[in-house]
Amino acid sequence: MAAVDEVFDITFLENISFIKDEGLTLILEEKVPADHAIGFSPYYKFSMQNTVTEEIMGEIRLRIGATNDEINYRGNIGCTVFEKFRGFNYAARSSKLLRPIAKSHQLNPIWLTCDENNIAAIKSIESLGAEYVDSRAMTEDYPYAWYYPIESRVKRRYKWIIY
């Protein structure tokens, strides 16, 4: 089995608790330090909240790193929009709101990935102007294969230049 990715520690931004646009608020839930034992980069975790109703609509994570795993399979942004809120561009809107944080950590490009058959994610990523790079299948000895269900082991990769 291949070795886990080397990750680095960051100084998390102190001056953010939420980010918002019209109708959408990202509420900072956690700042998670790097996990050196398994090679996961540090990340910010936000809840997506409807600004008017205050319903939680999903969550989004911004991983600050450029590991092999992030570039090829995991991506820098991980997003889940709860089913009843899908179809309103919350994933793309939330991703755009994260750009200033990524920029402050000199994270450019941002790598975005999705399963090959996830049409909604493909549309969301492409609406950001991210460039499709290729699709990659995980190898048998890939150290993070345990993290992905079998049906999620081929990823479309996109490069999103944010500045």
Image: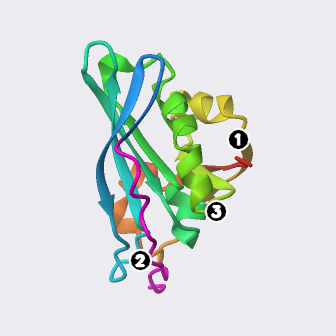
Q: What residue type is labelled 3?
A: Gln
Q: Which of 52 and 63 is in front in this view?
A: 52
Q: Is 127 situated left or right of 65 in this image? A: right
Instruction: Please provide the residue range marked out in magenta.
Output: 1-17
Q: Is 78 situated left or right of 154 in this image? A: left
In this figure, which residue is indicated by the disc labeled 1?
130
Task: Select label 1 or label 3 by which is in front.
Answer: 3
Crowding around mark 2 (Cα neighbors within 10 Å: few <14, some 14 to 19, many 20+) is: some
* Label 1 – label 2 distance at C-alpha: 26 Å
In this figure, which residue is indicated by the disc labeled 2?
39
Residue 152, percent from left and from top: 44, 50
Judge whether residue 113 can be spotted in this image: no
In this figure, which residue is indicated by the disc labeled 3?
106
Identify the residue shown where x is 49% and y is 79%. Answer: 5
Q: Earlier in the sequence, mark 3 or mark 2?
A: 2
10 w.r.t. 57: above or below = below
Crowding around mark 1 (Cα neighbors within 10 Å: few <14, some 14 to 19, many 20+) is: many
Identify the residue shown where x is 26% and y is 13%. Answer: 53
Identify the residue shown where x is 69% and y is 56%. Answer: 109
Residue 81, percent from left and from top: 37, 30
